Image (spheres, rainbow, N blue to C red):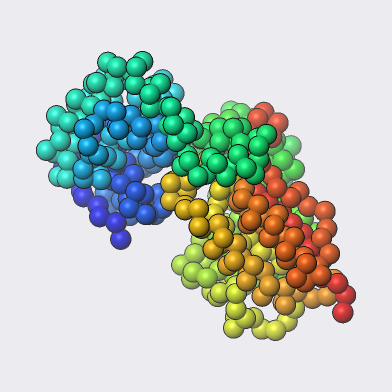
Amino acid sequence: MIHISLISPAAKADSLAYQLAYAAQAVAAVRAGSALPQALAQIFARADAPPPARGAIQDISYRAMRRLGVTDGLLALLANKPPEPEALLGLLNCALALLVDGEEAGYDPFTVVNQAVEAAAISPDMSFAKGVVNAILRRFERERALLMPQATKTPPGTWNYPTWWIDRLKGAYPEDWQRILHAGNQAPPLTLRVNRRQATVEQYLATLAGAGMAARQVGPTAVRLDKALPVQQIPGFADGMVSVQDAAAQLAAPLLDVADGMRVLDACAAPGGKTGHLLELADLELQALDHDPRRLDRIDENLQRLGLRAELTAGDARQQQWWDGKPFDRILADVPCTASGIVRRHPDIRWLRRKTDTAQLATLSSQILDNLWQMLRPDGKLLLVTCSLWPQESEQQAIAFAQRHNAIRLPAPGQLLPTASAETDHDGLFYALFQKTGA
């Protein structure tokens, strides 16, 4: 549980000061080891913030994560010592991120500085530091032209990633590493999966056009909205016509070529996007497995909205206590990984991960794959999915698995690098499809 300090009840939720104060605590929680979504969830559970304020707090927090390298570099130049407590450091990270991004962030510099000082004033942990906040931010504005080149001399300051992450990308993708880093620093779009049981992509695009919403097709069933909206405002979402899912993630279910009546396992299934997609494609006997019973609730919510059903099971994919012994025709193994391919959606990951995580997670995933393979019927198919860019978790994992089990490797996309263009827009995922030889 992270420490959350409630700000002054007199603070107005629609003020930038209120939003900066809570975003600062979210950034501080990430520095303490918490994932940003969990930190925000705990803040929103305690702070009585209305939806617009929550959206602003989230936007500022995520922007701060995408600019943490350069803002830390600036603070090394602007402050005599690291600002304390962590919430004060978080506040300066957030305010500097808004100032660095300028017009893109949507706030004028005077407002950012003024409201950052006010954010310190209304926060019990930072009220002593109003003068420090004012001095640091005003100096940045005065000396910006001099400070920015100095702050961006280091790889973290230039790219906003840890040095080890940048070096690893250079080694794995010597021709593409800069493009990959750039893509990971962009705010992600809102991409929808059209439920083919209810509509075609063309029909849904016409529905959006009728509602005055601009969008384009970026995958077989993927539609990207030009402007992100709360899901409650998306036509057909409440009725299960569409679901939020990245275009790369939408490739998983079709690769398993499921047919009516098949027995299918979706391992490591939460939050259930791929579960729902599989059930949209065919009438299946589908079991959705996840190690955390609380995460099964998310799957249940998604399936209820889609009007679909699956057997939801809490269990460890490395073990077999939850399995009834009946083999599966298809297995989707979206295994644990460093999530290095989805940093544009989760920019905190780059700061939370350590170099050693890759090997540890690759070992865990290999244990899961070896166990699941025993549950697949002869001639059945298993799809390995990761949202990682590191070969140790993806291609090297696939090669080693095929060798261990004499598995037939079928055509699949392999490593998809993150991209954002008018024609294609997706995260960095990896796919390897295997078939079990007959008995």
Q: Indicate left or right for 100 with 380 as reference.
A: left
Q: Indicate left or right for 75 with 353 as reference.
A: left
Q: Nearer the viewer, residue 207 or 378?
A: 378
Quadrant housing the N terminus: bottom left
Q: Position of residue 107 (x, y in %)?
A: 35, 23
Asked if residue 350 can be seen in this view, the reply is yes
Asked if residue 283 can be seen in this view, the reply is no
Quarter of the figure with residue 170: top right
Q: Position of residue 184 (x, y in %)?
A: 54, 38
Q: Residue furthest left?
A: 128
Q: Is residue 291 above or below residue 184?
A: below
Q: Indicate left or right for 247 with 432 as reference.
A: left
Q: Residue furthest right?
A: 438
Quadrant housing the C terminus: bottom right
Q: Position of residue 337 (x, y in %)?
A: 57, 57
The residue located at (39%, 37%) in the rendering is 68
Q: Position of residue 171 (x, y in %)?
A: 62, 42
Q: Is residue 360 above or below residue 5?
A: below
The residue located at (73%, 66%) in the rendering is 401
The residue located at (44%, 31%) in the rendering is 154
The residue located at (28%, 22%) in the rendering is 140
Quarter of the figure with residue 218: top right
Q: Nearer the viewer, residue 339 or 421?
A: 339
Count of marks overlaid on the render:
0
Quarter of the figure with residue 111: top left
